[in-house]
Image (cartoon, rainbow, N blue to C red):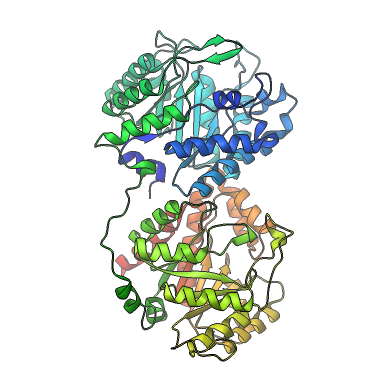
Amino acid sequence: MAHPLLDRLAHGPLLADGAMGTMLYSRGAALDENYDHLNLTRPELVSAIHRDYISAGADLIETNTFGANRFRLETHGLADEVRNINKRAAKLAREEREIAGTSTIIAGAIGSTMRSLEPFGLATREAIRDVFREQIEALLEGGVDCLIFETFGNIDELEEGLFAARESTDLPVIAMMTFAEDAVTIGGSSVPDVVAHLASHRIDVLGANCSVGPSKLLPVVESIRREVEARGADRKLAVMPNAGWPTKSGGRVLYPSTPEYFADFARQAVRAGIGLIGGCCGTTPDHIRAMRQAIDELSVAPAVNGHDAPTRPRVSRIQEIAAQEGPTKLASEIGTRFLVSVEIDPPKGLNPEKALAGARMLKQAGVDVINVADSPMARVRMSALTLCYLIQHEVGIETIVHFTTRDRSLMGLQSELLGAHAAGVRNILALTGDPPTLGNYPGSSAVFDVDSIGLIRVLRQLNAGEDSAGASIGRQAAFSIACAVDPTKSDLKDEARRLHAKLDAGEHFVMTQPIYDVKVWTTFLEHFGGEIPVPVMIGILPLQSSKHAEFLHHEVPGITLSDPVRDRMRKAGPDGRTEGVKIAQELLAELRPLAQGVYLMPSFGRYEVAAEVLEILDARKQLL
């Protein structure tokens, strides 16, 4: 399955953000300070700029890492901060996307090392490649969706960056050279030279940025298109010009091109068939907002952030309530056929559209039910219950809500459960919840009036038509109750004891923490005393890279990887994402006879990875 960037480019042009340096300077950053270091020293400033570009309608934003390689950082005494700066930059961009709730693509920005290669300079190709690889790996660890090499004047240096990228990842790569007014790079390469030299590299989007304004740069990219077509290739193109030539006035750097001028440029770029359109030095959120409007006015352009608003007839509240009578679809079908559930995290902000778009894609991929986490890792997110309601009513797919006892008193638990039932959210995963000390509010008070076993008893009582005090609730509820089990725990005897207690309390099916070895599950079953008498959905979390695997193993509670899996991910190198999908598919094939469903947990909001894992089920159906 294609990456979201490539999928969306196939359906119409995407709008990138504008300048980062220009905006940092306009908001108080000094010309002589290191702008990449601001990711660590003034993260709120960087985040605000990302936020403004997303609000302006950018489909893709770049991390604040243009100069965050070892060679450029060492001139500021920051050579040892490469990993911290790049990883934090990716995190800042991802957090703003989550808060906005959009499907904005996060591109890891990579600029020149500013070193000349041998024989004219002192830097060897190996040294340049190592410097790029170090930055790329840090960006990948931070969770970027793709890489963007920009403002390169020397083909040989860009080539080393591309080699480093393909040695580290299979994510999409955008590569942009910079051309002067005579359509020649700083290194003296013409458009035909650039296209011929880069033809053998795996570049997903090729283009030009910086140096000159729209009137000079757009013809360059059109020339690139003609050269690419003449070679029989099919590459998407990118163009991101400066806002004209800069001038200094009153101690300030000013760019002359207006937002209106850039709106006209955007229309020309769309008509020229350019897939990725954005701005470079001097462009601001105002420029991007004007370009967004211009692109949207053209019939070939997708809606903002690449997703059309769903249009479907509304049903009356009476019809909704009537549809809630009887067992849930999940309760009716679990145990009768193999079911698929995929986890979606609620956004950190006010906009749920990215989560809804993910649910739509997963529904189309054949997923049976979406489960929604309840502020995992004790970090503040949108109400899981609210997102479940939106998914069920806007997307039309059933949900399982993770419901924790961490934040709710016994009275509050029951009030929210009654509301969940009325809203049609009736599949409940009963959890105790991560303690607040894990999250961003370590001083917050946990409630824990009851634990997960107590919550299951409350749900069973509601299903009997009474609250926990024995008072009638008018009629019997119809909750489907799930519990969690962690077969990777060191004390399997105690975990088996707790599962028996949960079964006695009245749960209906089991969902496991991620498993990376079939023996882990069979060993747990031995401690449990045989087959579990209710349906089981086995948890699988696809890995993205070796660093991702090590992070999960060492730093995330409830996740333990097997040594063979960690070794496979180390050996996979740049193909970590592909290997992670393969491992997940192998686990799914092996565990399927031992379970009644699978519970997939894609990281970084990459729901397309879950769809890739599930392709093995379609393949098996075809064999049958």
Residue at image position (75%, 25%) is 77
What's the residue at 51%, 76% (across, down)? 417
At which x and y percent is residue 393?
Answer: 36, 65
Q: Quadrant of residue 66?
A: top right
Residue at image location 49% in from the left, 32% down from the top: 148
Residue at horizontal 30%, vertical 65%? 622
Q: Nearer the viewer, residue 586 or 77?
A: 77
- Res 235 → quadrant: top left
Q: Is residue 288 above or below residue 376?
A: above
Q: Position of residue 295 (x, y in %)?
A: 32, 33
**Foreground pick, 313 / 433:** 313
Q: Is residue 438 visible?
A: yes
Q: Residue 72 at x, y = what percent?
A: 66, 23
Q: Give the farthest residue toward the top.
A: 182
Task: Relative to 435, say whether 525 is above or below.
Answer: below
Check the picture and name the quadrant holding the C terminus: bottom left
Please give the count of numbered marks on the rendered protein: 0
| Relative to 119, 277 lies left or right | left
Q: Is residue 342 visible?
A: no
Nearer the observer, 565 or 29: 29
Q: Is residue 590 left or right of residue 88?
A: left
Vertical placement of residue 333 versus 208, above or below: below
Viewed as shown, does residue 499 lie left or right of 333? right
